[in-house]
């Protein structure tokens, strides 16, 4: 089968590698260079999330594949099992941590409740008076751009072809892609893996940009041990309609701290929103006052591809013959790219999958009545 | 701003725990480098690079960040942009 | 330098007290001083900010009371403009507004301040261009301008053996300073060839002030000047450094080793365009693009001096004065200075021709030579990328605190890349300060 993959972010690269290994003739079209879009903008947090059983299955499988790759990843990938420490500010959040622990444990995900004293001992940079937290020790952090490049190299080793500087501007009949320079390439199936930009190629695809800000600091080795996320993150991050910020600090292999996070729906400008940045950092300082004196050296933004139900779109798009989607991963593209690739390959080739493919089928969010209202 | 050309007085700064008398108005970077002339062997090294190599100042004007040291507890201060102050504590990792 | 007397809050109060501002001048070197003086004397309310601890820029650093520097600084002090050193632009907008970080030793409890002037004059100057060659990260290897700045900050070079290398008129000034301060000037290696220097020297006959300067320099440094000669490697020795200089054209190279304590190597200057780019100003081949009135492509933003194209003191002074006058609405007065401004531009073009870099300099770095000093990225890691951004993401080049200001110019020389991404914070700033909404 001849498959065109549009986009060489981590999702497209992983998909191309999986498809090529499964025997497809995969060709990747990348407008710029691998891993330069949302992949480069993300935190690189490999984390099990449990908002829904499907999300839990996808993230757990994703993390499992990451673990299996760990020994082969290039050093530049900076893969480190820092664990995630979900920080509970008060008793309510502690109860939420308990509930989360129960859900994770039920699927065999190792995790452990941490009391206030242990929290203070493990992460002395956190303010006093926090209730405790939940440690998920097998979560990891990774620096995504080299991984996307590496996965693409794996795809090439398995027979895939990569066109760089090849901007796909339109999808033609059944699998064809047209490039900015007018060239048309045929394929049996085209897989759109362009993140929040998918709607530019696939009209009415239910993906909206959700902008995030990140700040990186100068090196302060040892200040933070695990990826720290406030438990309030879950309720903030999933309140789709409103802008939100949450305390989310990641220790990089370099000793730098990566500081997030913010969410703004339907904002497409990539500029730094100073007010949002300040709000985000102020939230982080509430949890970690000592961060205030650490020099921030860069900030940037990225556009997450958000879907209405918080699950990615992986599978055929019913409105267009030959068009498959691999997008809508919101903030979990790094974690789930390897699992997404498996789901996609299994669905496309009709093979067995490690996890169910049904929950991710784009058809769940397709309403035939609303196609092509404009033009 | 005192004129470095006409030092009127001296200040005492602590460089890596050692008290050093330095003409007022000097930059911290100059004070660090002038240790060479005292023959204490500390050379031009002010910091260790991220891979552990010895480094000293390059640009002298706040651009290159090669002269960083911890000054009065603040990490990553550009010493070429700071004047010595009496009682200042400078920590290099070189 | 920021000294005891200037408590951080003192300078911050000075910024805050400067409201409303007609003209904000960014940079207090000769161009900025000239712009501020002209605008303030024309009746505008002027605020001058500069990242450095004192006004004067690099050329007038620690300038003292004598000469042109003293006169310009006295006039600045008398003109009514507020001058706040130790202050750097962190971000920009809306419009010509900029957000600044307070004075040095920036306190994380101190918020940033938004300055919303009617007009901005960019006088952000230039920095040194570095060319990576094996050993250039060895302690004791500094910039040429770097050595000049450090000596003016109090570095003692008495009795020390100094080799000055690279390119541009700055090398001579550095050599002269070393001699004045009792250093032993071993050599000045100027990569431009003797015939180009001679033609440049002949051209100076048309500019008497520059000629006098050149003659006085010649007595001090003439005997050790080596034209057509550049460093290809430097290594530590038992005492000090050993630098290898290469002379002769392609195929006729002759290498010489010199022992020294300090190698001061700088390959000309490059304009500081970060603030201009953040504001959205068009950047031309030489620097920030300006029209005949020193106006940039962005409304109410003017630019003057080295940031519009490296051309030396006289260009900075005349462009600064013209920009200050235009910013104050005195176009007619600015118009009278068109001829000297034009001459200064011609001189800048001649400088560029004379000191154009030998293409062999781009090939000095071997695979192990560090290019990005913040992140220790060697040249070998950078080969094969399509451009700056890809290289940055995949190799970490430019990801350190200098934000590409050093390695960006290195990769421009070696790989021809344009390092054009500029995002806030334009300078490192404590997280605490960024966490507060800017004042105003």
Image: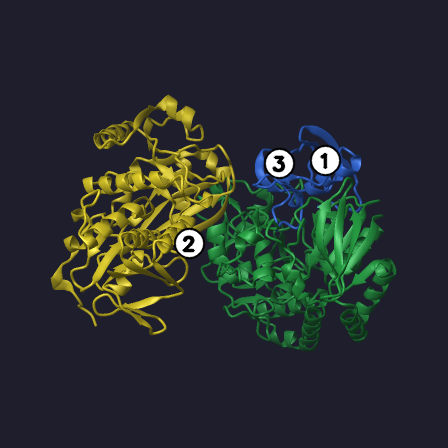
Chain colours: A yellow, B blue, C green
Mark number displayed over residue B71: 3
Secondary structure at numbered mark 3: strand
- Location of residue A54 in the rendering, given as x and y in whole percent from the top left corner: 20, 42
- Location of residue C360 in the rendering, given as x and y in whole percent from the top left corner: 67, 63
- Is residue C309 visible in the rendered image? The answer is yes
Vertical comparison of C182 with C298: above or below = above
Closer to the chain start, of discs 1 and 3, is: 1
Q: How crowded is the residue under tag 1: few (<14 C-alpha within 10 Å), some, or many (20+)?
A: some
In the orientation shown, which residue stands out farthest toward the top? A117
Secondary structure at numbered mark 2: loop
- Location of residue C36 in the rendering, given as x and y in whole percent from the top left corner: 64, 62
Which quadrant, please, contains the C terminus of chain A? Answer: bottom left
Q: Which residue is mark 2?
A: A272
The residue lying toward the viewer, choosing from A9 and A265, is: A9
**Label 3, label 2: how far apart the Cα atoms are:** 31 Å
The residue lying toward the viewer, choosing from A274 and A356, is: A356
Relative to A74, is A7 on the left or the right? left
Which quadrant, please, contains the N terminus of chain A? Answer: bottom left
Q: Which residue is mark 1?
A: B42
Whether tag 3 and tag 2 are in contact, CB under 8 A, the answer is: no
The residue lying toward the viewer, choosing from A101 and C388, is: C388
- Location of residue C126 in the rendering, given as x and y in whole percent from the top left corner: 64, 60
Q: Mark 1 against mark 3, which lies toward the viewer?
A: 1
């Amino acid at each position: 089968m001849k498959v065109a993959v549009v986009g060489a972010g981590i999702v497209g690269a992983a998909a191309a590698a999986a498809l090529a290994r499964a025997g497809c003739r995969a060709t990747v079209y990348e407008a710029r260079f691998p891993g330069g879009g949302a992949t480069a903008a993300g935190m690189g947090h490999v984390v099990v999330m449990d908002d829904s059983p499907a999300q839990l299955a996808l993230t757990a499988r994703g993390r499992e594949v990451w673990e299996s790759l760990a020994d082969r990843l290039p050093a530049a990938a900076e893969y480190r099992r820092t664990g995630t420490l979900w920080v509970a500010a008060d008793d309510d959040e502690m109860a939420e941590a308990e509930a989360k622990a129960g859900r994770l444990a039920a699927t065999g995900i190792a995790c452990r409740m941490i009391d206030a004293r242990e929290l203070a001992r493990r992460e002395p940079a956190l303010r006093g008076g926090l209730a405790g937290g939940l440690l998920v020790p097998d979560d990891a952090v990774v620096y995504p751009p080299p991984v996307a490049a590496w996965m693409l190299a794996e795809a090439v080793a398995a027979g895939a072809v990569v066109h760089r500087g090849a901007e796909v501007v339109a999808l033609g009949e059944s699998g064809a892609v047209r490039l900015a320079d007018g060239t048309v390439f045929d394929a049996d199936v085209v897989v759109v893996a362009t993140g929040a930009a998918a709607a530019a190629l696939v009209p009415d695809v239910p993906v909206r940009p959700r902008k995030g800000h990140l700040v990186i600091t100068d090196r302060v080795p040892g200040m933070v041990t695990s990826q720290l996320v406030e438990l309030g993150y879950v309720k903030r991050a999933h309140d789709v309609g409103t802008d939100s910020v949450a305390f989310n600090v990641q220790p990089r292999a370099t000793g730098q701290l990566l500081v997030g996070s913010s969410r703004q729906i339907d904002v497409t400008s990539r500029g730094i929103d100073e007010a949002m940045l300040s709000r985000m950092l102020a939230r982080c300082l509430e949890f970690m006052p000592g961060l205030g004196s650490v020099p921030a050296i860069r900030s940037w933004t990225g556009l997450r591809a958000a879907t209405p139900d918080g699950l990615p779109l992986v599978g055929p798009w019913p409105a267009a013959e030959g068009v498959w989607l691999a997008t809508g991963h919101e903030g979990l593209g790094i974690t789930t790219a390897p699992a997404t690739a498996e789901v996609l390959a299994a669905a496309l080739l009709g093979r067995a999958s490690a996890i169910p493919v049904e929950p991710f089928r784009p058809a769940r969010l397709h309403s035939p009545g609303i196609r092509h209202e404009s033009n | 701003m005192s004129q470095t050309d006409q030092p009127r007085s001296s200040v005492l700064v602590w460089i890596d725990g050692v008290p050093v008398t330095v003409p007022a108005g000097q930059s911290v970077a100059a004070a660090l480098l002038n240790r060479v002339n005292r023959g204490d062997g500390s050379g031009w090294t002010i910091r260790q690079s991220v891979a552990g190599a010895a480094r000293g100042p390059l640009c002298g004007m706040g651009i290159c960040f090669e002269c960083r040291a911890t000054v009065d507890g603040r990490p990553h201060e550009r010493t070429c942009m700071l004047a010595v102050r009496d009682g200042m504590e400078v920590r290099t990792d070189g | 330098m920021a000294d005891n007397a200037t408590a951080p809050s003192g300078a911050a109060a000075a910024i805050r007290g400067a409201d409303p501002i007609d003209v904000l001048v960014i940079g207090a070197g000769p161009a900025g001083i000239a712009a501020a003086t002209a605008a303030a004397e024309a009746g505008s309310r002027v605020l001058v900010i500069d990242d450095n601890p004192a006004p004067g820029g690099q050329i007038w650093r620690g300038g003292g009371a004598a000469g042109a520097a003293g006169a310009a600084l006295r006039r600045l002090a008398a003109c009514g403009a507020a001058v706040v050193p130790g202050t750097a632009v962190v971000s920009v907008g809306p419009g010509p507004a900029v957000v600044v970080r307070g004075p040095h030793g920036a306190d994380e409890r101190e918020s940033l301040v938004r300055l919303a002037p009617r007009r901005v004059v960019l006088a952000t100057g230039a920095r040194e261009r570095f060319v990576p060659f094996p050993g250039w990260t060895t302690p004791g290897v500094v910039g040429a301008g770097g050595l000049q700045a450090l000596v003016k900050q109090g570095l003692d070079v008495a009795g020390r053996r100094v080799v000055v290398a690279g390119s541009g008129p700055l090398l001579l000034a550095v050599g002269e300073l070393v001699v004045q301060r009792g250093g032993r000037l071993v050599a000045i290696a100027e990569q431009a060839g003797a015939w180009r220097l001679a033609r440049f020297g002949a051209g100076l006959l048309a500019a008497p002030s520059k000629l006098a300067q050149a003659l006085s320099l010649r007595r001090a440094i003439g005997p050790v000047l080596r034209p057509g000669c550049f460093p290809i490697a430097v290594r530590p020795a038992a005492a000090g450094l050993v630098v290898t200089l290469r002379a002769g054209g392609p195929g006729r190279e002759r290498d010489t080793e010199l022992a020294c304590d300090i190698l001061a190597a700088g390959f000309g200057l490059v304009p500081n365009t970060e603030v201009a780019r953040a504001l959205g100003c068009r950047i031309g081949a030489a620097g920030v693009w300006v029209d005949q009135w020193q106006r940039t492509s962005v409304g109410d933003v003017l630019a003057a001096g080295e940031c519009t194209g490296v051309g030396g003191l006289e260009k900075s002074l005349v462009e600064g004065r013209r920009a200050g006058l235009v910013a104050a609405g005195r176009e007619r007065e600015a118009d009278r200075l068109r001829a000297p401004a034009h001459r200064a531009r011609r001189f800048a073009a001649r400088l560029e021709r004379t000191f154009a870099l030998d293409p062999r300099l781009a090939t000095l770095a071997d695979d192990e030579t560090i290019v990005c000093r913040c992140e220790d990225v060697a040249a070998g890691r950078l080969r094969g990328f399509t451009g700056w951004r890809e290289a940055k993401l995949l190799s970490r080049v430019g990801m350190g605190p200098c934000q590409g200001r050093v390695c960006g110019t290195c990769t421009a020389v070696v790989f021809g890349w344009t390092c054009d991404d500029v995002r806030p914070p334009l300078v490192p700033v404590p997280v605490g300060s960024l966490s507060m909404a800017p004042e105003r």
